[in-house]
Image (cartoon, grey):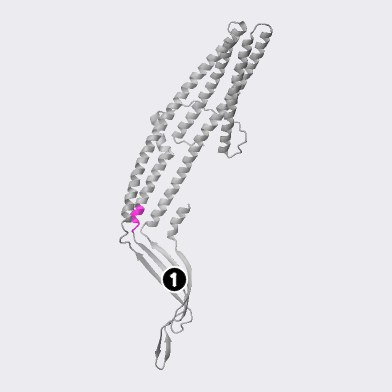
Amino acid sequence: NAKIGLAKSAYYPNIDISSSYSHIGPTSKFELPGLGTFQLYPADNYSASLNVNQQIYDFGKTEKNITFENQSKVLSQLSLEQLKQKLSLSLVGNYYSIVYLQEAISIKNEELKTLKEHLTFVEKKAATGSATQYEILTTKVRISNIENQKTDLETNLKVLQCQLNSYLGESQQSNVLLKKDVHAPEILESADALSVKALGQRDELRIARQRGMMVDTRLKMVNVQNNPVLNLFAMGGYKNGYIPELGDPKANYTVGVSFKLPIFDANRSKYNRQQVQTDLRGVDQDTELARRNIVNEVVESRANVDATLKKIAQTELQLQQALQAYKLADTNYIAGAITNLDLLDSSTSLAESRLSVMKSRIDYTVSLLKLKIALGERIY
């Protein structure tokens, strides 16, 4: 905004007040016989004036400067939107990593609760001679492993919560509990249709096009930099030195116009034009590169969404099977048909299946949000 205002200032006059004092010696004098001695100008000279200089017309220079700065402002706004998108994408990864860890810790707590209940059951059986010390030790080892895994998860959670507090501008010690905000499956258009949509919405392509417009305006600015300039100037004030009373200050003024036409600028315009034309070709190549990268991102994000959607179906089926297997293992263990280790393996498989389902749902949500960003949609 300041640069736009500075460019527009060329439309307004420059106004200033100036004053001066000078002592001159010797002063020119001449003598006429019978009339006396005459002095042409005083030894002490005083002047004060108000000066105005107004540009009348510069043949498009100021207009193109203002156009360029307005285009620069649009580019800054687009860059700000792009920065918000990048910040949002970074936050998405942090957010859902915390959600995953919160759920994983919750599942580990339930797994520990189940194992401890099982340990109590085995110890009672051992007291009656129905179980061995090996089964007790095996269960305790499994509990210890799960507690170690839970400790690692809690450590990672603290680190990610610290990062989240940095995003939010909060104290590093703030505890934040996030909601498990996963997205339901959506019906998506084809990759070609999504690519066309992205090319019309992505900030990167808008920025590339805006830069092209700015370089084109710079070329126009170079083409008019040797245009003539027409100015109006005016000055009014008081000064002494007027005959016959050289010491008395008198009102005076000066009004006029000036015209400046550059003839030779040492080839600066020529080389500036060559440089801008090269920049214009570079911007065209950057625009094409941005277009190709956007299409690639859309295709990749679309494929990731499809893949994570398939994983959701697969992991949910695995969870159902693991749940049935655990129920059967529990029944068989009570009946004495399988060992304690078989039951523990079945319990671990059930917990891992629950984690896999949750992770696949979170991966789908993150992939869907990345696709929305690839399409240029605002997720904030």
| Region in magenta | 220-226
Q: Is residue 365 above or below residue 258?
A: above
Mark 1: which amino acid? Met
Q: Position of residue 92 (x, y in %)?
A: 52, 33
Q: Position of residue 98 (x, y in %)?
A: 56, 30
Is 371 or 356 nearer to us in this picture?
Answer: 356
Residue at image coords 56%, 18%: 351
Q: Residue at x 39, y 43 (%)?
A: 209
The local crowd at label 1, few if under 14, some if 14 to 19, many if 20 or more residues have their Cα within 10 Å, is some
The answer to whether 214 is drawn above or below residue 141 in the figure is: below
What is the quadrant of residue 337 in the picture? top right
Which residue is drawn at the image coordinates 62% and 16% (left, top)?
140
Q: Secondary structure at mark 1?
A: strand
The quadrant in which residue 348 appears is: top right
Asked whether 221 falls inside the magenta stretch, the response is yes
Q: Estimate the x, y position of residue 323 in percent, counting from the top left.
A: 56, 14
Place of residue 202 in the rendered image (x, y in percent of width and height, measured from the top left)? 43, 38
In this rendering, position of residue 267 left or right of residue 237:
left
Tell me, yes or no, if residue 366 can be seen here.
yes
Would residue 327 be seen by someone viewing this image from the given angle? no
- Left or right? Give the position of 218 relative to 236: left
113 is within the stretch colored magenta: no
* Residue 41 as seen in the image, left or right of residue 137: left
* Residue corresponding to mark 1: 235
